[in-house]
Image (tube, helix red, strand yellow):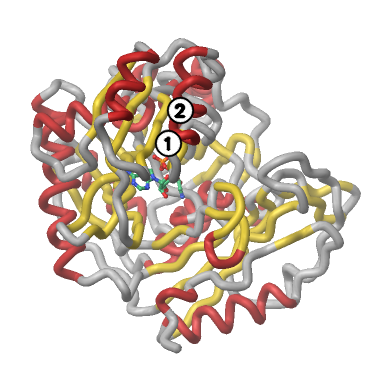
Amino acid sequence: MNILILGQGGREHALAYVISKSKLVNKLFVAKGNAGIKQYATIVDLNPFDNKAIMKFSIVYEIDLIIPGSELYLANGIADYFQGSNISVFGPTKKAAQIETSKAFAKEIMKKYDIPTAEYQIFDNYNDALNYLDANKIPIVIKYDGLAAGKGVVVATTKDEAVIALKMMLEDKKYGDGSVIIEEFLEGEEFSLMAFVHDEIVIPMPIAQDHKRLLDNDLGPNTGGMGVYCPVPIITQESVDYAVLNVMKKAAKGLVKENCNFTGFLYGGLIQTVDGPKVIEFNARFGDPEAEVILPKLKTDFLEIINNLLHSCVKKIEWDDDYYLGVVLASKGYPNKYSINHKIVGTNKTDSLIFHMGTKIYKNELLSSGGRVLLVTGKGKTIEEAKENAYINVSNIECDNLIYRTDIGAKSVKK
Ligand code: AMP
Ligand code: GLY
């Protein structure tokens, strides 16, 4: 098979890594890729938002399957564009991707199909929202319903914070004309449950835990993720089984009933409350950095899984028993202003997997080119061993502009 991956981060690097090991792959292309992806795939200078150009390229290079990395390509209609062609896209249509792109749509699906999530109400009007706030407990969560560059969620611990957030979103319209969801605050461990989905077929993957805050002890601003590990020993198998049945399978079935059949990676962002796992959000693509620690565990051929699924054929998938832990090295200043083009050395000092999130090669040197730059993994028979190995590997990397958390996986490591 000839494959085209769309994207340029660590997730796409992990996808390129597993696809390059498949016995079914003939040619592997990535648009636009990064310096790390280069070792597994041919990098192509193709705009991942230009569906027409992607179609042209796919015909010329006889592409069989396109895997979009980011939700932005799904929202841009890549799956819709290729419908009816003989080129498959492993990603949902724009309509089905609303499970991620519209929080109101996701909430309605959850309500209608009895999927456990926080209580909520949707508001367009500032005064109505304030009245609801008066009638509910603090902390409370305010979410903008639309794309807000990851800044649309405010977990308000005081009423003043909630009022400021509502004013910013509904009165000052800082992110645009969208409505706002006010949601019950849920307490517990968060975890990410991903599944390969095609219509009602749901094949779950091992769970992972992301670390969204910039600094140790979950302090500092939210980021795209500063570290991750898989599997997650602090979440019981019973909870995972419950979530597969009551979240992932119900969501896939619900989307079929709504005529929004989902094909692709479905991501459940879950929280383990005292009443069981509840949904914080759905995503319509692989998690990043989750992909970087889940995909290396795969023993079954990745393309075989996708191929079988696209033909509605269900076969057992095998995963190894190891733990994988990934530490993100980010540019100083991230998630705010940061500089790029800093030289990085030492990535070849280990056999462990290092996934590139934002790098480029310039004059034979490896340079940083983004906010999150590298994800360095460690593997082990226990989470403790994986953590130790990951940090040994981190210590081999030299660069004058990279920062990282020192406590990835700490909650799962026995004291
Ligand atoms: P989201 O963009 O929906 O993933 O939210 C970002 C982060 O806000 C999540 O990872 C949670 O840590 C937090 N969050 C979102 N919704 C809730 C909720 N209902 N209760 C508690 N924390 C939440
Ligand atoms: N790791 C969070 C995300 O991919 O959305």
Does residue 415 show up?
yes
CA distance for labels 1 and 2: 6 Å
For the point 51% across and 28% down, the residue is 164
Q: How many marks?
A: 2
Quadrant of the image occupied by residue 98:
top left
The kind of residue tagged 2 is Val
Q: Quadrant of the N terminus?
A: top left
Left or right for 330, reference 238: right
Residue 385: mark in rendering = none
Q: Which residue is mark 1?
A: 159
Residue 163: mark in rendering = 2
Left or right for 197, reference 292: left
Residue 88 locus on image (x, y percent): 34, 31
Residue 126 locus on image (x, y percent): 39, 15
Farthest right residue in view: 363
Residue 410 locus on image (x, y percent): 49, 75
How packed mark 2 is, by other alpha carbons closer than 10 Å (few <14, some 14-19, many 20 or more), is some
Q: Is residue 137 above or below residue 300?
A: above
How packed mark 1 is, by other alpha carbons closer than 10 Å (few <14, some 14-19, many 20 or more), is some
Residue 104 locus on image (x, y percent): 28, 24
Asked whether the beta carbons under mark 1 and mark 2 sit within 8 Å of each other, the answer is: yes
Q: Is residue 239 above or below residue 302?
A: below
Q: Is residue 3 above or below residue 147?
A: below
SS class of the residue under badge 2? Answer: helix
Q: Nearer the viewer, residue 80 or 285?
A: 285
Q: Quadrant of the C terminus?
A: bottom left
The kind of residue tagged 1 is Lys
Q: Nearer the viewer, residue 148 or 351?
A: 148
Left or right for 413, reference 272: right
For the point 12% across and 49% down, the residue is 246
For the point 30% across and 29% down, the residue is 134
